[in-house]
């Protein structure tokens, strides 16, 4: 097994051993609210692999650089990452189905048509945020297809989701925001309503990163977002 595979296996587990207990512990399907189809699948503690590969790419070597993008052929590690996300979704869907079956609910972590498209992702963006820096409320550009994955690294933070139609809210009537806790190594999957009808944001200014009544200490944070460009024909 090559080094990259070892690193990815540490982060996501060995998908070939789908009956292993390790994998069972590996994934904790997490969803903030049922109406938000953004799910986070939390891997084991080790997410240093992505930091290693991001460093190896030489991205962020300059303190002034805080964003790197790739279109089309993704670097090998991102292809591996896409594969791991695919495996995680397959396993997570199975686990969610079992759980929801008992509750008589429908389960879908990521739609099958998106999961099996080729390639799963062909655009990558890595963002580096210093403490206090975040991202304003937005819906990702329509040039990207449905089905977006974000891997959140280093600092924990809270991502807030708010309905698009809340745009007209006044200062007296601020939009309702649904918080989702992102711990290091979290995978966020945005599709359907969560991708098109909800804005997402990370406000890391003091007073906004509250989880269970506690302000989360904000450190440097890196995220890796994977998307697929829409067809132009
Ligand atoms: O940094 C993040 O987790 C979010 C990134 C994001 O929303 C974007 O690049 O569109
Ligand atoms: Fe986004």
Image (cartoon, grey):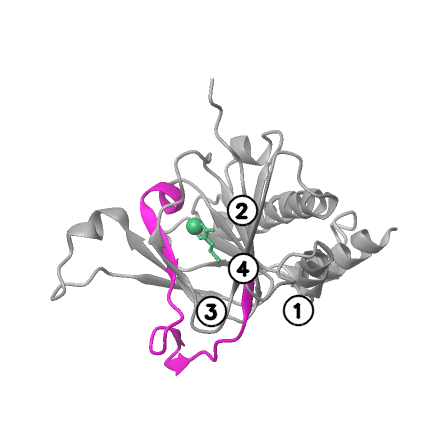
Residue 86: name its quadrant. Answer: top right
Residue at figure coordinates x 56%, y 62% from the top left: 222
> Dot 4 lies on which element?
loop
Residue at figure coordinates x 75%, y 52% from the top left: 19
Badges 2 and 4: C-beta atoms under 8 Å apart?
Answer: no
Query: In the shown orientation, is residue 126 left or right of residue 79?
Result: left
> Dot 3 lies on which element?
strand
The image shows residue 168 at horizontal and vertical percentages of 15, 51
Which residue bears the numbered disc 1? 45
Q: Residues within 10 Å of mark 1 (few under 14, many from 20)?
A: some
> Dot 2 lies on which element?
helix
Q: Residues within 10 Å of mark 2 (few under 14, many from 20)?
A: some
Which residue bears the numbered disc 2? 97
Badges 3 and 2: C-beta atoms under 8 Å apart?
Answer: no
Which residue bears the numbered disc 4? 66
Badges 2 and 1: C-beta atoms under 8 Å apart?
Answer: no
How far apart are the alpha carbons under marks 2 and 1? 25 Å
Tag 4 or tag 1, which sits nearer the N-term? 1
Q: Give the residues in magenta.
A: 193-222
* 219 part of magenta stretch: yes
How far apart are the alpha carbons under marks 2 and 4? 39 Å
Tag 2 or tag 3, which sits nearer the N-term? 2
Which residue bears the numbered disc 3? 157
How far apart are the alpha carbons under marks 4 and 3? 18 Å
Front label number (4 vs 3): 4
Tag 1 or tag 2, which sits nearer the N-term? 1
């Amino acid at each position: 097994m090559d080094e990259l595979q070892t690193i990815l296996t540490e982060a996501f587990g060995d998908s070939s051993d789908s009956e292993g207990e390790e994998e069972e512990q590996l994934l904790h399907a997490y969803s903030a609210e049922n109406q938000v189809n953004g799910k986070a699948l939390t891997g084991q503690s080790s997410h240093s692999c992505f930091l290693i590969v991001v460093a190896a790419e030489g991205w962020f070597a300059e303190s002034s650089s805080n964003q790197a993008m790739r279109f089309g052929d993704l670097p090998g590690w991102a292809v591996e990452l896409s594969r791991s996300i695919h495996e995680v979704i397959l396993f997570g869907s199975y686990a969610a189905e079992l759980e929801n079956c008992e509750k008589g609910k429908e389960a879908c972590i990521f739609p099958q048509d998106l999961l099996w498209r080729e390639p799963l992702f062909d655009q990558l963006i890595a963002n580096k945020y210093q403490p206090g820096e975040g991202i304003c409320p937005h819906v990702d550009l329509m040039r990207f297809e449905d089905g977006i994955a974000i891997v959140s690294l280093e600092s924990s933070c809270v991502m807030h989701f708010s309905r698009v139609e809340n745009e007209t809210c006044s200062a007296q009537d601020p939009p309702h925001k649904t918080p989702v806790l992102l711990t290091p190594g979290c995978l966020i999957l945005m599709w359907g309503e969560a991708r098109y009808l909800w804005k997402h944001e990370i406000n890391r200014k003091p007073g906004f990163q509250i989880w269970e009544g506690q302000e989360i200490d904000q450190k440097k944070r890196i995220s890796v977002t994977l998307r697929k460009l829409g067809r132009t024909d």
